[in-house]
Amino acid sequence: MNNLPSGADLLSIARDTLLSELLPLASGEARYALLMVANAMAIAAREAEAGDAPVKSAVARLEKLYGETLSGDALESRLSEYERRLTQDIRAGVFDTHDDRQRALLAHLRESVLDRLRISNPKSFKSEKP
Amino acid sequence: MTIDDSARERLEGFVRDKVAADHLSISRLERMTGGAVQQNWAVDANVEGGTFAGPQRWVMRIDAPAKVAESLSRAEEFRVLEAMRRAEVLAPRALWLCDDAAVMGRSFFIMERLPGVAAGHKVARDAALVPDRKRLARELAVNLARIHTLTPASAGLEFLKTRLARDNVAHYRAYLDTLRESHSVLEWGLRWCEISAPEREEVTFIHRDYRTGNYLVAEGKMSGVLDWEFVGYGNPLEDVGWLFAKCWRFGQHHYPVGGVAQADDFLREYEAASGRRVDSAALVYWQVMAHVRWAVIALQQRERHRSGIEPSLELALTGHILSDLELEILELTERQ
């Protein structure tokens, strides 16, 4: 067990300190750099918080799409394997026709993008129509 | 890159010879913002005698130490600017090219420095800078139509390559294949671009970076188009799609034309000036291609950081705009 507070907690209080105590002292390029640092810290914190939930749900969607479960390997490598296959199939035209398969693909792609947006840029996620 | 006194004197000597001046002194030589690929330096000079007597404001365009494979050489860009001048496009006038590395260490050219503001968020949001959006829409349209009057046969720029819709698809796929991970949303966008590609395409000279942020506005008027390093031959509608793409609206989504103007104000003028019809399907098509292209560029920038070649927070964060671009690709393709 690591000492507390956790890394995520530290990131959060470090970012608050940066924005409230350092940002007001900066101008011009330094201000721009600090805002980028704050953004990077927020992304890292959201990524830590999300954990492996996005990977898990992506694998579950792809298992359903392909109707089979890849055995063995770690979650991440199973996802890479599915994604490689998806790339080949998309290029080969497997999803060209407007049918259930295509709908399932598009639903998966959208969920994946939204999961990444929640981490990378939740602001634009909020502006999306429900 | 810094420029020491002896380099400054060599630069003075180079220009003095070009303008046949009795005396020429550079009073300001400063790096301008922007230009990760090429550097722009503001050059203020006082000239006595010769063909350019008086105070002068120029820009020196010189390669940055790290080259980007896809961009033109300075000598090629110089010829492009000359061709744009002949086509009466609003662009900086190219003045003198120097291929002699003994002067500045790399090849460079001098061009006129046009007045105005280019920064995208200012042009898109500052009503004092752009009081008349319809006027800017017309200027953007007329200039783009003029750019598109040049063809591979007429432009005389034999070093430029032609890339049409399907060539773009192949080009971006080839890049994705160099990456370790897969990008299924971009693959979907590329497949969509492949099967929706136009049967026949017109080929003209195209700018390939014609967007808000890359043209100057001064006193409410467009004063010049910048950033000519990615030009080539291709489908002229590629430029229209790039200009309209959501990723270049600087948050001003109620103005689909680069965050500055309404679609009709631009399209009416572009169609009249070019004699070309821009139907809504083509407009969507080239916006999808624009987002795929920007996503590929974002990946390339991210990889410059990740590979350790150029560690940079700014480049690293570029990797995180990817999902915004991907969402727009899904929105546009699912609507069809």
Image (tube, coloured by chain):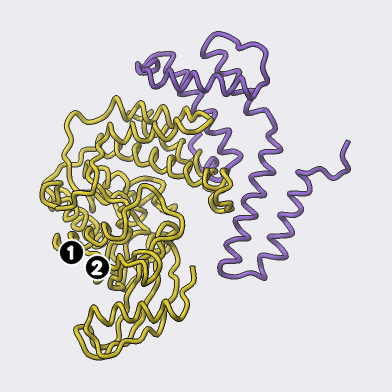
| Residue B217, visible in the rendered structure | yes
Percent position (x, y) of residue B157? 18, 52
Residue type, numbered disc 2: Ala
Residue type marked 1:
Arg
The answer to whether marks 1 and 2 mark residues whose Cβ atoms lie closer than 8 Å is yes
Please tell me in which quadrant of the rendered image residue B136 appears.
Answer: bottom left
Q: Is residue B310 above or below residue B39?
A: above
Tell which chain the image draws in yellow: B
Identify the residue shown where x is 32% and y is 51%: B230
Task: Give the colour chain A carries in the figure.
Answer: purple
Q: Chain of mark 1?
A: B
Q: Residue at x 71, y 60 (%)?
A: A18
Could you say whether the residue bearing mark 2 is in a helix, strand or loop? strand
On the image, numbered disc 1 is attached to which residue?
Answer: B85
Image quarter where the N terminus of chain A lies is top right
**Mark 2 falls within which chain?**
B
Q: Residue at x 39, y 45 (%)?
A: B246
Residue picked out by circle 2: B94
Residue at 56%, 66% (x, y): give it: A29
